[in-house]
Image (spheres, rainbow, N blue to C red):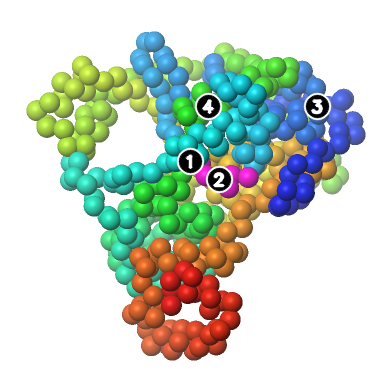
Amino acid sequence: MYYTNGNYEAFARPRKPQGVGEKQAWLVGGGLASLAAAAFLVRDAQMDGSRIHILEDSGLPGGACDGLLRPDVGFVIRGGREMENHYECLWDLFRSVPSLEVEDASVLEEFYWLNHDDPNYSKNRATLEQGASADTKNRFELSDEAALELMRLFFTPDEALYDKTIDDVLSEEFYQSNFWLYWQTMFAFEKWHSALEMKLYLQRFLHHIGGLPDLSALKFTRYNQYESLILPLVKFLEDSGVQFEYGVKVTNVLFHFLPGKKVAHQIVLERGGKPMKDCTGAEICMEWLYHLGVPESEIGTLAAQAASTVPCMMPYVTAFFMPRAAGDRPDVVPGGCVNFAFLGQFAETPRDTIFTTEYSVRTAMEAVYTLLGIERGVPEVYASVYDVRCLLNAAHYLLDGRRLTEMKLPLPYKMALHAGLEKLRGTTLDELLVRYELV
């Protein structure tokens, strides 16, 4: 497996790997990562769908990408997944999945047309004090020192951030900024979460910094992700003959450890699943109504009679962001493994960020391409972090339009800045600094 970019390989159809007709694939779990792996096996490895088996503990596919009507309790959804135009692996997948609603169109085309005609943005980014507008005026309000703290984090090597929290590298002055308000409300980060993960997010989504204040950086499906992404993907797989088994819980995978390689030889499973106990969501609804500014005298009645709230347990949702170090998460294909891979949010792949649909699809693509030797590159993570234009554009927004020379910097920094700007005068970099209103 190797990475690539550009459209040379993006549109190429790889040849069928040797011996794939005699192989079978067993995918544990029916979430997006497994569904994507099955699709890549069908499309790129040209494996017969009947030789692909998806084992799912619950009665439905999709994992956390849910959104369905349960007649007994109401509509259940664990949240929406924020997407953007540079989810390279996700869109590589859905360009091949037919839309369920738009005739002769792919899911990607349906998504593209929707966001072209109805781009996302928020008229009011956040509320405070029981429903009052935060009135951020789309500014970041980073002080010069807070901006420097963020810059230091951005350029810190990964190794220096192992097992450190955000609180270890950023100060209270930074937390008072609108940037932190935008960051928390978009990504669910807390001060005790991983400084490394925050740095990776900064680098991964650098090209969308300007869209944080009004959410214009984001793109969404027409409906929830279960109906807009999972259902068409499942139909594509079922039409290809992929085998789904529900009510199957995998408890272990057994290996033969041979000289120089590890071979998975048995899946240990249980059939027939432990259902989650139903519980009331009235108290959760009351808390929500309180923060929206609903008169307290009306909250209890509205929560009980005007809404149906269903709690959904997500015990691992913030585990994504806990401080970590190298080796805490397994590689997609661990060293020596010839027929086994890890998929999804707790596998390790370089440069991309967890808690995204892209991460699920990327790990699936890397697993299939590695184990079957697919003759096509996996699209690399969009390289905005290496694009000086994206860096300068982000700096422009983070400084709320202030010039670099207007920043209150320590004397050594100020002297270095002026010396550097003088050296750049008349160069292409000088033109870019002017274009992005930094000088």
Residue extending farthest to the right is: 18
Magenta segment boundaries in residue numbering: 81-88
Which circle, 3 or 2, is nearer the viewer?
2
Q: Are marks 1 and 4 in contact (CB under 8 Å)?
A: no
Amino acid carrying label 1: it is Lys
Q: Within 10 angstroms of label 3, few (less than 14), some, or many (20 or more) residues?
A: many
Report, in whole angstroms, how far the alpha carbon at label 3 lies from the one at label 2.
29 Å
Name the residue rendered at 58%, 23% in the picture: 102
Which mark is first along the chain, 2 or 4? 2
Q: Would you name the residue on which mark 4 appears?
A: 228
Name the residue rendered at 59%, 64% in the picture: 387
Q: Would you name the residue on which mark 3 appears?
A: 47
Residue 219: mark in rendering: 1
Report, in whole angstroms, how far the alpha carbon at label 1 lies from the one at label 4.
13 Å
Residue 58 pos. (x, y %): 54, 19
Which circle, 3 or 1, is nearer the viewer?
1
* Number of numbered tags placed on the structure image: 4
Report, in whole angstroms, how far the alpha carbon at label 4 lies from the one at label 2.
16 Å
Q: Within 10 angstroms of label 2, few (less than 14), some, or many (20 or more) residues?
A: few
Amino acid carrying label 2: it is Asn
Q: Would you name the residue on which mark 2 appears?
A: 85
Element class at badge 4 = helix
Which mark is first along the chain, 2 or 3? 3
Name the residue rendered at 63%, 33% in the picture: 94
Report, in whole angstroms, how far the alpha carbon at label 2 lies from the one at label 1.
8 Å
Of residues 146 and 245, which is closer to you in this image?
146
Amino acid carrying label 4: it is Ser
Of residues 68 and 273, which is closer to you in this image?
68
Which mark is first along the chain, 3 or 4? 3
Report, in whole angstroms, how far the alpha carbon at label 4 lies from the one at label 3.
25 Å
